[in-house]
Amino acid sequence: MPNHVHLLLKPGDTLPRQIAWLKGRTAFEANRVMKRSGSFWAKDYFDHWIRNRDEWEKVIRYVERNPVKAGLCKSPEDWKWSSAGRDTRL
């Protein structure tokens, strides 16, 4: 998505620590590629704990359909960065 990211994690550390690392690393690389500096990500994020396999599958479907809903592609498999068509089992 051009203005946000969906990410499903199996936490091995505290979520805020994982998010801080991801945001820091990706901001550094994105700014390098775009030849800019400064803030890249918003300070906040939305998190949701997935409690079972059914909920995991529901969230996967939502994330994969998001670019279609936004009119960026015709099917989830058409989105270059999609997990659609890949193994997303727990």
Image (tube, helix red, strand yellow):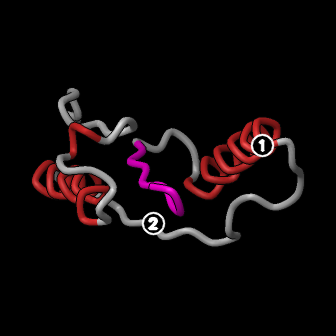
Residue 44 is situated, as x and y percent measured from the top left of the image, at 63, 72
Front in this rendered view, residue 14 or 54? 54
At 88% from the left and 58% from the top, the residue drawn is 38
| Residue at the limit of the structure toward the right, as seen here | 37
**For mark 1, what is the residue?**
34
**Quick one: SS at disc 2?**
loop
At 89% from the left and 51% from the top, the residue drawn is 37
- The local crowd at label 2, few if under 14, some if 14 to 19, many if 20 or more residues have their Cα within 10 Å, is few
Front in this rendered view, residue 56 or 7? 7
Name the amino acid type tagged 1.
Answer: Met
Q: Is residue 47 above or below residue 29?
A: below
Q: Quadrant of the C terminus?
A: top left
Secondary structure mostly seen in magenta is: loop
Write down the region rendered in magenta.
1-9
Asked whether disc 1 touches disc 2, contact meaning CB atoms under 8 Å apart, the reply is: no
**Quick one: SS at disc 1?**
helix
Residue 8 is situated, as x and y percent measured from the top left of the image, at 38, 48
Q: Quadrant of the N terminus?
A: bottom left
Name the amino acid type tagged 2.
Answer: Asp
Q: Nearer the viewer, mark 1 or mark 2?
A: 1
Residue 33 is situated, as x and y percent measured from the top left of the image, at 76, 36
Q: CA distance from mark 1 to mark 2?
A: 28 Å
Q: Is residue 39 above or below residue 85?
A: below
**For mark 2, what is the residue?**
47
Q: Is residue 54 left or right of residue 18?
A: left
Residue 5 magenta-highlighted: yes
Q: Is residue 32 left or right of residue 67?
A: right
Res. 35 image quadrant: top right
At 27% from the left and 50% from the top, the residue drawn is 73
